[in-house]
Image: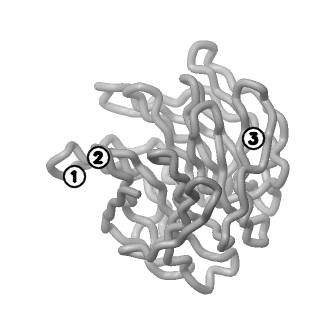
Amino acid sequence: MYVVGGYDTARNSSAAVFVYDGTAWHDGASLPIAVNHPGAAAIGGAVYVAGGFTPSGATNRVFVLARGASGWKEIASMRRPRGALALLTVGGRLYAIGGRDGPTQVAVPERYDPRTGSWTDLPAMPAPRNHVGGYVNGVLACVAGGRSPDTSAALDCFNTTTSTWRPLATLPTATSGAAAAIMDGITIVAGGEPSGETTIVGVTQEFRAGVWTREPMLVPRHGTAFAMYRGRLWLCGGATAAGFQAVATCTSLHP
């Protein structure tokens, strides 16, 4: 399980990578650049990191850490800089969705094919926004919540076989910077905060058979993502106060 980039406790962008091997955390190979709000995903044993914010603004640079490699390799850049995006893997390809570049919401998603080493534009999002929670449901690449700058309650999915968007549901509580996943057929959106960064959304919102329920989080947080590990969903790092308060804790859940 990998945690990459983000902010350190002094709110500096970080190049740090931490790896959990099932027993303990270890320092991984550092990213070539310090970056916060990047997207991260895996294809097989390779870990990809795309976009994010550097001290000079959003970046379009992309890096891969191959299985067994001692360091990161830079690959083709995205066609657009974007930070606070979702990076998702469907069918052995990467999908970069949402994010912003300065005040501009990046509406056009992009797909990366490792076989050709190139990015391709996809149909624009119906409601462009950043700080989205991304997850995969079969052939669907989905994003939940976000900000534009208003906080969003939308849950939109891109069908990677038909290249079309459709709304899936509306969250009971609008949120941004939340974690999202699907497990055992249940859509889960955990934590986050409103775009004004005044409070934390301290619940998991769960969508079962067309009905939303809410449960309190063990450790309310925003600015992190779910990782599926050993049959449970894990949240590591993030912030436990509105705006900023970097933490090192990990918690897990099973719906």
Quadrant of the rendered structure where residue 129 is? bottom right
Q: Position of residue 227 (x, y in %)?
A: 41, 49
Residue tagged 1: 25
**Label 1 to label 2, Cα distance in Å?**
5 Å
Q: Position of residue 246 (x, y in %)?
A: 42, 72
Q: Are marks 2 and 3 in contact (CB under 8 Å)?
A: no
Which marked residue is nearer to the observer: mark 1 or mark 3? 1
Residue plotted at (33% across, 60% down): 252
Residue tagged 2: 19
Question: How many marks overall?
Answer: 3
* N-term-proximal mark, 1 vs 2: 2
**Label 2 to label 3, Cα distance in Å?**
29 Å
Quick check: 38 left or right of 119? left
**Label 1 to label 3, Cα distance in Å?**
34 Å
Q: Is 101 above or below relative to 213?
A: above
Q: Is 63 above or below relative to 168?
A: above
Mark 3 surroundings: few (<14), some (14-19) or many (≥20) residues within 10 A = some
Q: Are marks 1 and 2 in contact (CB under 8 Å)?
A: yes
Residue tagged 3: 80
For this orientation, the residue located farthest to the left is 23
Q: Amino acid at mark 2?
A: Val
